[in-house]
Image (spheres, rainbow, N blue to C red):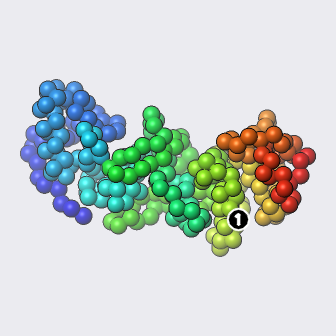
């Protein structure tokens, strides 16, 4: 971990004022407004703070305040988990990045998936040389997370069970319903798989579509017991959902109140009823 250079009392006051007013990446216009100085002066001060290790330059003209317990060298694309967690805090690593971490997929993804309670304008962005996919989620749903060490920094990642629930909430974050289904099959072969915890997490998400997708997939592939199927049915919400919102779905399972694509009609145990 690199050591920050010292700054003057005035510099520390400027940094404190800046971080108090910044809700995300910092640019010269924001700094000039906060410091009440011309943009040229603000630019020089930003560069000085970045050179001293108190700000991280994430792209041209854009900086990020470095948390007190993390060095600027840690917040680089060498580990996008650290950078993403700091950029979008409060946040956790999930989706396909969590799948890779827990060895629930053999696929390799080019970007890091971050869940945050912040409202972001772009769901796909590149900062600090790393690519991120961002999903906004209510902070009240920050559960089922594990703290893991990345070098000398701890970050949060969804645990295997929560990762599965996030995927059935939004299959696109796992690459689609097929990779999501494959991940579920791998999950159920793990020693730490837990169907009771899976249904509890699903209920805590307050989205009936999760139970529709989960129950439909589990039953059609024969990868879960009857009690689990009954539990999923007991939590079905009204109305009809899609197995994968990104796919054309003309087939209806009335049992699961779920539309599914033609590609699923040949699955061994799918019943259109």
Q: Nearer the viewer, residue 103 or 18?
A: 103
- Compared with 35, 160 (above or below) is below
Q: Secondary structure at mark 1?
A: helix
Q: Is residue 240 visible?
A: yes
Identify the residue under disc 1: 185
Q: Judge left or right: residue 89 versus residue 242.
A: left
Q: Is residue 227 visible?
A: no
x 44%, y 64%: residue: 148
Q: Judge left or right: residue 268 versus residue 181.
A: right
Residue 30, given in percent of the width and then of the height, sits at 25, 30
Question: Could you say which quadrant of the image residue 185 lies in?
Answer: bottom right
* Residue furthest to the right: 273
Q: Nearer the viewer, residue 204 or 7?
A: 7
x 91%, y 46%: residue: 273
In the rendered image, which quarter contains the N terminus? Answer: bottom left
Residue 235, given in percent of the width and then of the height, sits at 77, 46
* Residue furthest to the bottom: 191
x 78%, y 51%: residue: 263
Q: Nearer the viewer, residue 195 or 166?
A: 166
Disc 1 crowd rating (10 Å Cα; few below 14, some 14-19, many 20+) is: some
């Amino acid at each position: 971990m690199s050591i920050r250079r010292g700054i003057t009392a005035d510099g520390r006051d400027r940094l404190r004022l800046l971080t108090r007013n910044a809700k995300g990446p910092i640019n010269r216009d924001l700094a000039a407004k906060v410091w009440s100085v011309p943009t040229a002066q603000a630019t020089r001060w930003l560069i000085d703070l970045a050179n001293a290790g108190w700000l991280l330059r994430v792209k041209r003209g854009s900086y990020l305040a470095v948390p007190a317990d993390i060095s600027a060298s840690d917040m680089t694309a060498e580990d996008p988990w650290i950078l993403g967690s700091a950029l979008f805090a409060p946040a956790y690593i999930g989706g396909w990045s969590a799948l890779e971490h827990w060895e629930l997929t053999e696929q390799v993804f080019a970007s890091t998936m971050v869940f945050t309670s912040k409202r972001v304008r772009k769901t796909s962005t590149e900062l600090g040389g790393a690519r991120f996919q961002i999903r906004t989620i209510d902070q009240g749903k920050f559960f089922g997370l594990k703290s893991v060490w990345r070098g000398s920094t701890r970050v949060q990642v969804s645990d295997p069970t929560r990762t599965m629930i996030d995927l059935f909430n939004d299959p696109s974050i796992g690459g689609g319903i097929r990779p999501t289904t494959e991940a579920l099959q791998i999950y159920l072969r793990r020693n730490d798989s837990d169907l009771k915890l899976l249904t509890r997490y699903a209920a805590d998400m307050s989205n009936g579509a999760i139970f529709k997708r989960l129950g439909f997939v589990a039953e059609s592939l024969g990868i879960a017991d009857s009690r689990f199927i009954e539990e999923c049915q007991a939590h079905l919400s009204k109305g009809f959902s899609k197995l994968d919102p990104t796919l054309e779905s003309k087939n209806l399972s009335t049992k699961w109140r779920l539309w599914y694509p033609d590609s699923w009609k040949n699955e061994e145990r799918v019943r259109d009823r």
